[in-house]
């Protein structure tokens, strides 16, 4: 009797464990990923970026836009100083001139930071969908968290530059181009080129598929904008007289390009030329080898080729800055596809290095740390390019070996023949 009375009480305090959790692993992963992503984004935008840093890319842009609106000479800076300078052409100035309508920089800068953070998240969402995952998949928040932890995204927001918007333009170009929307793709690429001419080598991608509409639109955008902007920009001729000569100078600070590396360490000209040719050859091998997939796996080809071209520009031009590595995200995220150069180990050594937010200059080893801060990104871009070139050669060699293998005749089954007889 006592046991029967205790049975209801026991059922309240004890229960058999269910065989399975109510939430599937993917849902649990989302529970983990979204708080991490939101926390990191909030910190990067509202703490790191809002606070800013000694390097300030936005003030020069806003000041130039303000001068454009106020009809003052736009290119009136002293270009032999080390401070960040306004280097955009008149066409880009016209495009950015609405920033000058803001009543103060204290209003314009936070809005600009938010716009770039939003553009980065939209680009990541676009890349997630392009990789075959729904936005409800935990890949998306984990990708946001990882991206906003990188040196590239952090510095873009802290320095308050336009690279987030340019990443979105790059992703738009790649997606529209691969899907056959040539005119739209060209307009997106043209927008990126007028702001940063470093995107101009991407014109080769549509040309490799005999698509002439995208290059035509991409070239037309900067040409038309500059034709319109030239008579509207006060002191436009200063861009040719002051800015263009400055752009031709290789600076030996905050410059991860091979030329910057050579200038900083006083590299002999012959060694600089040799390294230049070797890296250029690796870029050529990678681009030509990847072209074999331009129809069979168009997205992998276009995204990876864009990464090779942009990292090549960063290394081989007069100026390469670490935060340009953000433009390599479309290439890197091909790792989520069945075929990709990102499936080999060496390329990730380069990726981890150039995305690392670590600072090596410390009081315990100031000289070594300072040198590591200077050379690591240059080395990382080189590893990235050479690894992709090596993958291309490996895949091509393997395919040729399989094609050259003699076709084996089926083995004769004597027992079956005897039974048939």
Image (tube, grey):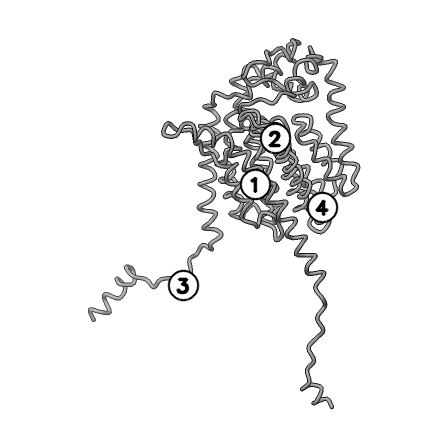
Q: Which residue is mark 2?
A: 272
Q: Residues within 10 Å of mark 4 (few under 14, many from 20)?
A: many
**Mark number, residue 19:** 3
Q: Quadrant of residue 60?
A: top right
Q: Residue at x 71, y 51 (%)?
A: 296
As drawn, the residue found furthest toward the left would be 2
C-alpha distance separating marks 4 and 1:
20 Å
Q: Nearer the viewer, mark 2 or mark 4?
A: 2
Task: Measure how far apart labels 3 and 4 are at the Cα level.
Answer: 51 Å
Tell me the number on the disc at residue 291.
Answer: 4
Q: Are marks 3 and 1 in contact (CB under 8 Å)?
A: no
Are circles 3 and 4 on residues that touch, CB within 8 Å? no
SS class of the residue under badge 3? loop
Q: CA distance from mark 2 to mark 1?
A: 17 Å
Residue assigned mark 1:
383
Q: First in sequence: mark 2 or mark 1? A: 2
x and y, in percent, of residue 237 in the image: 71, 12
Number of disc labels: 4
x, y (%) of residue 199?
A: 67, 32
Nearer the observer: mark 4 or 1; the answer is 1
Residue 390 to residue 413: above or below: above
Q: CA distance from mark 2 to mark 4?
A: 29 Å
Where residue 100 sits, quadrant-wise, is: top right
- Label 2 with label 1: CB-CB less than 8 Å: no
């Amino acid at each position: 009797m006592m046991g029967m009375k205790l049975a209801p009480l026991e059922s309240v305090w004890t229960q058999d464990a269910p065989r399975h959790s109510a939430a599937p692993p993917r849902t649990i992963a989302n529970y983990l990923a979204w708080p991490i992503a939101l926390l990191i984004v909030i910190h990067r935008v509202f703490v790191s970026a809002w606070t800013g840093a000694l390097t300030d890319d936005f003030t020069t842009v806003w000041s130039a836009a303000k001068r454009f609106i106020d009809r003052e000479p736009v290119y009136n800076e002293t270009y032999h100083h080390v401070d960040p300078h306004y280097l955009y052409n008149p066409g880009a100035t016209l495009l950015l001139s609405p920033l000058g309508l803001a009543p103060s920089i204290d209003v314009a800068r936070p809005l600009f930071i938010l716009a770039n953070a939003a553009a980065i998240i939209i680009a990541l969402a676009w890349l997630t969908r392009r990789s075959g995952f729904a936005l409800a998949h935990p890949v998306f928040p984990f990708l946001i968290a990882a991206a906003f932890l990188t040196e590239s995204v952090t510095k873009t927001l802290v320095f308050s530059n336009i690279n987030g918007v340019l990443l979105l333009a790059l992703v738009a170009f790649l997606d529209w181009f691969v899907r056959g929307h040539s005119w739209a793709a060209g307009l997106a690429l043209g927008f990126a080129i007028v702001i940063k001419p470093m995107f101009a080598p991407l014109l080769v991608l549509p040309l490799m598929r005999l698509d002439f509409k995208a290059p035509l639109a991409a070239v037309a955008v900067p040409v038309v904008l500059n034709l319109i902007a030239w008579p509207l920009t006060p002191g436009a001729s200063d861009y040719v007289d002051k800015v263009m000569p400055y752009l031709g100078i290789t600076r030996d600070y905050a410059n991860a390009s091979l030329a910057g590396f050579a200038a900083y360490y006083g590299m002999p000209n012959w060694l600089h030329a040799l390294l230049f040719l070797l890296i250029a050859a690796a870029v050529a091998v990678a681009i030509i080898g990847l072209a074999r997939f331009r129809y069979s796996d168009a997205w992998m080809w276009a995204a990876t080729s864009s990464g090779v071209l942009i990292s090549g520009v960063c290394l081989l031009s007069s100026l390469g800055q670490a935060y340009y590595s953000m433009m390599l995200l479309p290439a890197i995220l091909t790792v989520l596809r069945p075929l990709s150069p990102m499936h080999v180990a060496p390329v990730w050594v380069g990726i981890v290095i150039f995305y690392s937010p670590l600072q090596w200059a410390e009081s315990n080893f100031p000289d070594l740390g300072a040198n590591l801060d200077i050379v690591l990104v240059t080395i990382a871009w080189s590893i990235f390019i050479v690894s992709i070139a090596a993958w291309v050669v490996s895949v091509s060699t393997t395919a040729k070996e399989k094609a050259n293998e003699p076709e084996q005749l089926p083995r004769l089954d004597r027992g079956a023949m005897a039974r048939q007889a």
